[in-house]
Amino acid sequence: MFSSSWSLLICALLGFVSLAKAFTPEEVQIFQLQQELVKTYRNPDLDFYKMLKLPKLRDSSSAEIRKNLRKLAKTYHPDKNKKYRKLYERLSLATKILENDSQRKIYDYYLKNGFPNYDFKKGGFYFTRVQPKVWAIGIFIFLSCGLIHFIILRLQNDGNKNRIERFLREVKAQDDTLGLGEKRLLFRQNPDEEGREIIVRFGEVYAVQSDGKEALISTKDIVNPGISDSLLLTLPLWMWRKSVGCLFNFTTSVKNTNELPENKPSSEDSKPKPIRIHGSGEKLELPNGKVVRSRKKN
Ligand SMILES: *[C@@H]1O[C@H](CO)[C@@H](O)[C@H](O)[C@H]1NC(C)=O
């Protein structure tokens, strides 16, 4: 039932991936340095301002930050002691980032909202503390894709209904008993095909199936799909079934009203079932030689 939804699913995934991959080299540099600091000094609260020992911390101006590095260099320059090489590199980089207003803004943003946990060994990153913005956009993408899917389902359903209604109209036009008797017609999809018998009995249209049973063709059973048939509900349910649900081995069935009920032989139900009109570009030949074509699906 997801076949019609794959494109939407992919659209949602691409949305996520492009968001996720949208980090700039400046951001990656910031994440890397922040991660190094926290790991090296084993202090999750450490930030560039504290490391640089800025007297006014976040209230420092760019000029003060630049001046501060010169002060630090008096003690920590690698020329004083080789063991300061790595530390001095980090101090310079942090200074370079903070004295640039646009990069400082980026840094302050992640400081406030949390840094993604960038994992270079895994060739990417994953979120530990998730940025609220990313989730907001993710939810927005999910909701819009769900809505688009819902609209597509509705349109498909309307198309189905129209196709069947058109078919019924064509058939009833052949009924010369005017709905008061029985009229048997033969329909062919190809000239060399055996054809299918259609009965119009008291204005109702039946298709005779290969087992001789009659199936009522009607649009009464076509229910308009609701929001619950769209990705908005089926995707979370599907993911649930594919993941946690498997463990409990329970199945939740989601009714998909997009498709007409299949005409499976059913033992407990002797009532004729509606048949489904298959395929796209289907051709039905009326007994008078007229050919009914159903609209091609895009
Ligand atoms: C700040 O950093 C950005 C991005 O690296 C760069 O394009 C820009 O030229 C820098 N601005 C200054 C004043 O150095």
Image (spheres, rainbow, N blue to C red):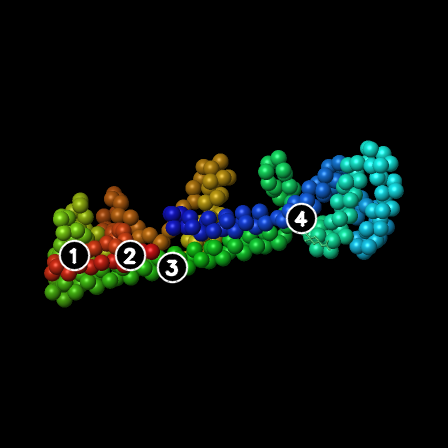
Q: Is residue 112 visible?
A: no
Sequence-first disc among 3 and 4 = 4
Proximity of marks 3 and 1: CB atoms separated by less than 8 Å: no
| In front: label 3 or label 4 | 4
- State yes or no: Cβ of the residue under disc 4 lies below 8 Å from any atom of ligand 1: yes
Label 2: few (<14), some or many (≥20) within 10 Å? Answer: few
Sequence-first disc among 1 and 2 = 1
What residue is rendered at 69% in x and 46% in y? 30
Proximity of marks 4 and 2: CB atoms separated by less than 8 Å: no
Secondary structure found at label 1 = strand
Q: Amino acid at mark 3?
A: Arg
* Residue at the disc numbered 3: 154
* Residue at the disc numbered 1: 285
Q: Amino acid at mark 2?
A: Lys
* Residue at the disc numbered 2: 296
In front: 82, or 288? Answer: 82
Report how far apart the C-alphas of labels 4 and 1 lie in the structure. 67 Å
What residue is rendered at 21% in x and 64% in y? 169
* Residue at the disc numbered 4: 26
Q: As drawn, which residue projects farthest toward the top?
A: 83
Proximity of marks 4 and 1: CB atoms separated by less than 8 Å: no
The relative height of residue 187 versus residue 84 in the rendered view (above or below) is below
Picture quadrant of residue 227 = bottom left
Report how far apart the C-alphas of labels 3 and 4 lie in the structure. 45 Å
